Image (cartoon, grey):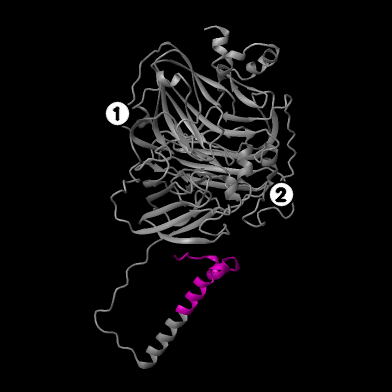
Amino acid sequence: HGPVAILAQVWFHCGKTPVALSTMASGFRGLSVLLRLSAVLLLLPRRLALSAPISSADGWLNVTLRVEVATVHLNFQNISFRARLYNGSFPGPHLRVSPGDRLRVLLRNALGADLPGAGCRAPLDHLRAANSTNLHVHGIYDDAVQDNTFVCVSPGEDFLYTYKVHKELGTAMLWYHPHLGGSSAMQVCGGMAGFFEIVDEAEEAMFDFAATLPLLIQMLEFNPASKEYIGACLDNGGTSDLPLRFSNPHNFTGRLLLASGEVGTFLALGTGELARLKIVNAMSGTATMLNFGFWGPSASVCTLHVLAYDGVYLHAPRRQRSVLLPPGGRADVAVSCSAPGQHTVGTLTIGAEDVGGLFDTELHPIVSLEVTGPGGRTAKLPDALPGPPPYYADLRQAQVDQRHSILFGNQAGDNIVGGWPYNGSVSHVAHRNAVQEWRLYGGEGVGMEKLHPYHQHMVHFQIISRSGGSELMAAVGDYRDTVPLYKDVNYTVRFVVPFTGPMMVHCHILKHVDLGMMTLVNFTDALPPVRLASRPLHLAPLARVLLALCMLLVAAALCSCFEGRRSVRDGCCHNNYVRVA
């Protein structure tokens, strides 16, 4: 392959937008192009310099995540800036455990003080608390005591998180990030995110992968006119006083898609060999739906099979032209190519032409496979995969115990759930160990114009039905923890929660969460059935009168509370309210 053929396989950012050299073949001449060749050298694919995972030993993993200010240096056009990071790393440390392990994470906040009046005591549905934080393990099968996203870890404070990984979980890719309302989007935008990987050695033995590559996908916007400009994102509505110290010597003003902190990476692979890509959509922003697959002619000689969504195995490999992930979503995919060459997996519009909130219409590389000669071995995927863990039963034919509905947003574009912004109150009470059937609705815009990804904590949910959209959104029968909601794309889901306590339900556009698009559902033990007396109960006349008066007083109190739902913020029913139809 000559130099032009090689260059035609790589991408560089020319001026303001990414441009494929293969589409510029007719214009590959002239001084203006030659002057830009230096940009090619800055984005030649290179091996990803992944830091070694921090792995458990003897059933334990003890780790400290120190939240501190550090400088991010990109491998593109010498761009750098300051941000809040975990342990000074962009992205954060890769944590790896096994099923049944115990984990202790000491979250240490080494940041300076919040601005006066903008700390954790500021109103919940506002941008605030730029230097305060907490931690969420996205996808963990656990309750809100362990995965505590209610606590505020203020500057100078520590908080110890403890987890017990379920012994039946199996191999799964999760991720962790801040979840403090008011600053979560800003902190994730700056790079506070990392892998949380569970590896089951018994399950791993069924695969023959030449390589496994975890890829945490992040986005940075360098156009000052954009509402997602990195400077605006890290300013957090004026609540952050951290100097950005932004260095952009070549005045790049486009978007970058980063794969584990890198722009342009490659993976060496032999013809016929299998590689596994573990992809996490960790983007913070509004246009963050990620649709990816093989580019151009590579799609005819390379295959892509989905093995798992959101850390839950499918029952069998599923061949797809592309994979669509909402922010927060994950996919394990197996890729293989039958012909040598450089074959790029990157963003696509194919299959997602009508999807609102799609990350750019332009192509951005995620990873280039450098496929050479006959491989050392020709691998084949197993016909059957492990499927969901045993505690995620198939509920499609199950008897439903309780029903509920969730509505994100409204036509006015407010950041609300079920008509209310988040204020710390419980909006619904449900029973643990009961089969829940919920309807999930998007309430903003028309068609698939406005995106609001649905995410719930504690447990995944099974897709029972989907109205609108395509199977790329979510397939019936799959277990997911994050799905895209639109006005015309809604779902019926079922799940069982074995825990008690409040479960967070929210949009996974984190800026929307910070501004109030979240609610709480409290899971409690069901009350035992009332047993009637075996013989008539005889009450004295005075006792009957007192009983009647008590019943009237209780009824009056309940009516007053329910009719006064508008006064939730004033503490009705001790600031816990039950929504009625």
- Tell me if residue 275 comes above or below residue 548 in the rendering: above
- The C terminus - image quarter: bottom left
Instruction: In the displayed orientation, state which residue is furthest to the bottom.
Output: 541
In this rendering, is residue 538 above or below 102?
A: below
| CA distance for labels 2 and 1 | 54 Å
Residues in magenta?
555-581
- Label 2–label 1 contact, CB within 8 A: no
Question: x and y percent of residue 277 in the render?
Answer: 46, 27
- State the residue position of label 1: 383
Query: Could you say where residue 483 lies in the image, as x and y percent from the top left?
Result: 46, 43
Can you tell which quarter of the image residue 320 is in?
top left
Residue 166 in view (yes/no): no
Q: From what the image shows, is residue 285 above or below residue 573?
A: above
Q: Give the percent coordinates (x, y) of residue 164.
A: 45, 44
Question: Which label's residue is closer to the chain start, 2 or 1?
Answer: 2
Q: Is mark 2 on a helix, strand or loop?
A: loop
Q: Name the residue under label 2.
A: 114
